[in-house]
Amino acid sequence: MITTTGARPDEVMTISASRLLEDDKVMFAGIGQPLLAAGLARRRQAPGLTVILEGGMIGVQLLPGEFPASTNEMRAAVGAEMLTSATDIFLMAQRGFFDYGFIGVGQIDRYGNVNTSLIGAHDQPSVRLPGPGGANDIASMCNQTLIVTSHEPRRFVERVDYITSPGYLEGGNSRAEAGLLHGGPSFVVTDLALMDFEPESRRMRLRGLQPGVSVEDVQNATGFQLLVAEELDALDPVNAEELAILRQLTGRV
Amino acid sequence: MTTSGITAPADTLRARRELESGPSRVREKLTTAREAVAALVHDGDVVAVGGTNHARTPMALLWEVLRQGRTGLALSRPLTCFECELFLASGAADRVITSWVGIGHGWGLARVLREFVEQGRATYEEWSHLGLGLRYKAGAMGMPFLPTLSMLGSDLADRLELKTTTCPYTGQVVHAVPSLNPDVALIHVQQADPFGNSVIDGYQLMDADVAPAARRVIVSAEEIVSTDELRRDPARTVIPGFAVDAVVEQRFGAYPHECYGRYDTDKDAFSSYMERVKQEGAEGARAYVREVLAHGDFDSYLEAVGADRLATLSRVEGLMPQ
């Protein structure tokens, strides 16, 4: 991918993700790119975005150059408006206060189901991944879930080995039938594209392309057949200001 | 070893009867880590580890459990850091009840946990973060279960054989998450008085539920203060003394993990541990355990870490509210 600014693929997706965040909303962010996207959005179009972390922090500000390694450390709590218990934070999600949940991916399927638990057999996996952390609760309870990931066939799979964090399950109405009456994935942001979910079938649908990327490129990097929207958006290239703020946050030069 | 399902059935009634039939819980409880662990941590226990990930981990108490050679333990913790690997590698524990295992973003996968789970030598009992929080909350409330949307439709629920229940008023179908009353909880706090009244600064995580849920509780505190001092600002006390069985004074008791407002994580210690297990897997973790236990107690270990290093980690002004 060529950008005029020399942004790396992970920076492109973090910046694309940050643009989806509107001002004066409440967002439950996972560690890593979701938190960076929130920090960037707060410094641009969404200064009133309230960022929630699973350690029990409400309204965190993110110290530039001191990017936390965990959602449960002093660095993550800097500038918080309120510190409460970890359980209470998730109960606020269950109550419906959080506009966005934002998570990463080990594997994802066409219905937006996410696996961060294991590869292979459930009893004796070939790779034991870290587990859900807060992602199962975020995906089950926030009013919508945003997903950010690099776009690779090993991640975009026909069927996830394990549903850690529910998307639309088997599609159609199956999420609601399982008792999940709220939320569900709204957008998937990658270094190649922006996807949403077709409202009836709940299948993943290509909506926009990163600069210099074709529909074929995206399909080739996806292990299942994507729906394609009738009119595709061309996503704006990363601009220099976005990149400068992001790199100030991460402490990268 | 790799059985799915829930470790212990909901046993909130037993936990309540123990309180009713036990001795008075209002007394001075200051003791040493050695005596507290000897009296209160038994082979086969479900051990709730306070804090989460690398925040307020009760490291001094955990080292004492390893030193005394307990076996057959299950460790429960919302987010688990490398302390669980020390227990797996040493043969002290064979089950981890958690929602996540790792050091943190950018540190890679937990190698020793992987080795044990992938070879079928340990069980990762996988809950959602809220799922485990509600297990503690139910235990703390004296109720056998709590309803929630958490884990509906997921494979977590299948593996755990979770049951749903129907709201008797609305008909809504929800998960019923069973209570957890851990056999023993180890919790590190900033301040406690000799009776066990405990102050947690910053984020409480789940510890204000873990303590009342657990059948036995050991608190270690950065400093012991008088009850009169706690009376000046009693809203800071989040664990009542009657929920605590033993109080241990331990400065830097979470090292190399952080303690909010007191000291930061020692990232060099994380790196050196990760390097060891990258080279040698579980044997690297066992060697690390042997080296730390070669110091007679936790204070001797801290002495070897060095006063300068601990002083550097204690400079947390920029990370604290002004």
Image (cartoon, rainbow, N blue to C red):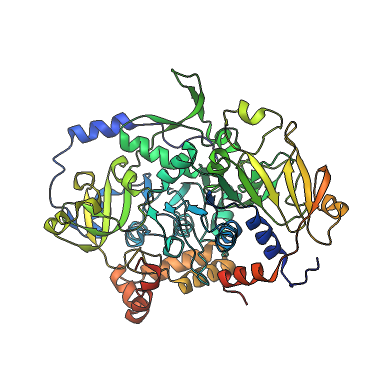
**Is residue B92 in view?**
no
The x, y position of residue B297, in whole percent, is 29, 68
Q: Quadrant of residue B249?
A: bottom left
The x, y position of residue B119, in whole percent, is 60, 50
Image-based side of A227 in relation to B270, left or right: right
Q: Examine the rendered structure and indicate whether residue A206 appears above or below residue B112.
A: above
Q: Nearer the viewer, residue B258 or A79?
A: A79
Q: Nearer the viewer, residue B291 or B261?
A: B261
Image-based side of B181 in relation to B285, left or right: left
The x, y position of residue A77, in whole percent, is 43, 60
**Is residue B296 in view?**
yes
Image-based side of A126 in relation to A226, left or right: left
Q: Residue at x 70, y 42 (%)?
A: A160
Q: Examine the rendered structure and indicate whether residue A90 appears above or below residue B187.
A: above
Q: Nearer the viewer, residue A101 or B160?
A: A101
- What quarter of the picture does the C terminus of chain B occupy? bottom left
Image mark count:
0
Q: Residue at x 51, y 44 (%)?
A: A98
The x, y position of residue B233, in whole percent, is 19, 55
